[in-house]
Structure formats: structure tokens, C-alpha cells
Amino acid sequence: MNLTTLGFAIAVLLVLAGLVLAAVGLKSLGGKPEQQRIETFVSERPDTQARGPDQPEDREFLDSLAQRTVVAWLKNIISYLSRYTPAQTIQETNRRLAIAGNPYNFRAPQYYGIRMFLLLLGMLLAFVIYRIHPSTMNLLLGLLLLAVCLGAPGLWLSSRMKQRQDTIRRGLPDALDMLSVITAAGLSFDQAMLRLGQTFRTPVGMEFVRVVSEMEIGISRRQALRNLQARVDITELSSFVSVILQSETLGMSIADVLHSQAEQMRVYRQFRAKEIASQLPAKMMLPLVAFIFPALFGVLLGPFLPVLMQILAK
């Protein structure tokens, strides 16, 4: 086995190891909401009460082998790398993660730890690729791989933010309709938000449930709604929060305000759909130029190529 084959094999093994570690880490750090709730309720196991002071419970042996080895090692690496996170970016990153719904229960230190881990992995892979065969092409390939490892977490977070904001934007008119129906039936606005979240397990419903949870621990309704506005950060919800706070100050009927807001949100949704449709022709230009026009030119100019070659040959 020569040096080139050995280096290529090492690079492939490093890529596979990085993918496995990332997949296992994301699976262990996140998990479904149902699994997290079950783990919360069974965190205190019944057999702990039967144990005496001389019989400590070895909780680390209750986990699987992968969680005690690979996952624990990955968490230690991420925690160590997160120490070098710039302090001034922690708050902004936490805000972006909150808008994205805190995927996999990430916080800013874990997020930047994963970014640094991918950066180091990309630097190592770029070095290995260049050492296999030093050339300009391999150098460019290594730099491209390094740029992908550096920018992939940011693109992933931005896509999760946009996806969740679009989901909340689409579901907000229906949620406001349900809130207006519930409040018209006799429930208060706080109870209506709680009932909406219990009925519809959607991002909109969960955000309203979080507002009620914040109010239960002593936060005022005004501040809880302001926190909702900051967590979601979309224009439609900001307008809704402003109108609700204004109606609360003026003593207006919440049911009437919710009904009018639901109609207004539907109008916003129609305008947004028209805006997206108006952008489609410009977005279709790149696929047309890249894929359709070359094939069309080939079909039209293909029969004239032999004649053109003969003319040029003369």
C-alpha cells in the first residue's frame, strides 16, 4: 500500500468517524419531546428509595454503552471547545437558537463547540487531502471542504429559523380563530391560550403555552407577550402582541380583537403568497439558463455543427 492510498483511506475514515459522532451526539442531545418528558418523570427511580446510604446508585451504568463512551466523549469535547466561544456572541446566538426552537436543546456554548469541532475536522481533512498529492486542485478542494465545515452550522441554523418562522406564520391565523372562538365561549384569554396549546401541538400552540407558563411563575402578561414577540421575531406576531397590549390598556373586548386580528392575518397570508408567487419568474431564470437553454441550443444548432466544422476546416 503506497502513501497516497494510505492517506486517502485515513481521510475516508476520519470523515466517517466525524459523521458517526455527529449523528450520535445529535441523537443523544436532542430526542423527541415525548422521550424527554418520560425521562423527566422517571428520573427519580423507585429503587433509589430502597437503597441505603451504604448502597449508592451507579447511575452511569444505567445508560447504554454508546452513551457511556462515544456520547460522553463527544460531550466532553464540545464542552472543552465551547470555552473559547466569544462572550459577546453568546446572547445573539441564544436568541437565534430560541427563534429556531432550540433544536436538540442546543445553547450557544454547545453550538460554538460543534462549530469549532467541525472547523478542526475540516482543517485536518484539508491537510490530509493536500498531503496525498500536493497540487493546486487538491489545495482548492481542501479549502472548499474547510469552507463547508465552517459555514454548514450557520446555514443549518438559518434554515431552521426560517422554517419555524414560516410554520408559525402559516398557523397563526387559524390559532387566532381558535382563540377568538374559545374566548367567545366564556374562557379568559389566559385559559384560551392554554387550551389552544393543549389542543394543537404545533409551534404556535406551544409558544402560547409557554406564555401561560411564564405567567404562572410570576411574570406579567405584558412581559410574557413581549418575550413571545422576541422568541418568534416575525412581523405578524409582533403586530398581534401590540394590538393585544393596546386593547388590554384601553379595556376592549378580547374576543372582538382576536376575531379582527385573525381576519387581518389571513389578509397578510394572502399578500405574502402573492409576493412569493411574484418572485418565482426571477428564481426560475437560473434553472432555465443552466439546464434548459443549453439543451435547446444543442437541439437547434446540432444539425449545423458538421457544416460549420467543414467550413472552418477549409
Image (cartoon, rainbow, N blue to C red):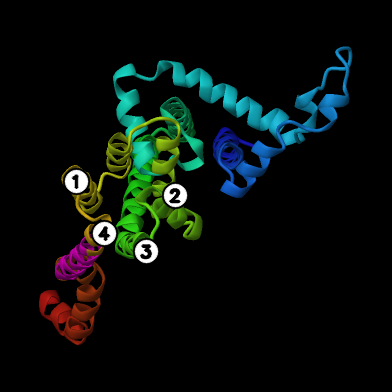
SS label for mark 4: helix
Q: CA distance from mark 3 to mark 4?
A: 9 Å
Q: Are marks 2 and 3 in contact (CB under 8 Å)?
A: no
Q: CA distance from mark 3 to mark 1?
A: 19 Å
In this rendered view, identify the residue nearer to me: 250 or 123: 250
Q: Quadrant of the C terminus?
A: bottom left
Residue shown at 72% from the left, 37% from the top: 42
Q: Position of residue 159 (x, y in %)?
A: 35, 49
Q: Which mark is residue 242?
A: 1
The three-letter amino acid code for the residue at tag 4 is Leu
Q: Position of residue 75 (x, y in %)?
A: 58, 27
Mark whose residue sits in front, 4 or 2: 4
Mark whose residue sits in front, 4 or 1: 4
| Span highlighted in magenta in the image | 260-278
Image position of 174 (left or right of 236): right
Looking at the image, is mark 3 or mark 1 earlier in the sequence? 3
* Farthest residue, direction bottom: 303
SS label for mark 1: helix
Prevailing secondary structure of the magenta residues: helix
SS label for mark 2: helix
Q: Are marks 4 and 1 in contact (CB under 8 Å)?
A: no
Looking at the image, is mark 4 or mark 2 earlier in the sequence? 2
Q: Can you identify the residue that label 2 sits on?
A: 206
Image position of 279 (left or right of 213): left
User: Does the rendering let one see residue 32?
Assistant: no
Around disc 1, counting alpha carbons within 10 Å, would you say few (fewer than 14), some (14 to 19), or many (20 or more)? some
The three-letter amino acid code for the residue at tag 2 is Met
Q: Can you identify the residue that label 4 sits on?
A: 258
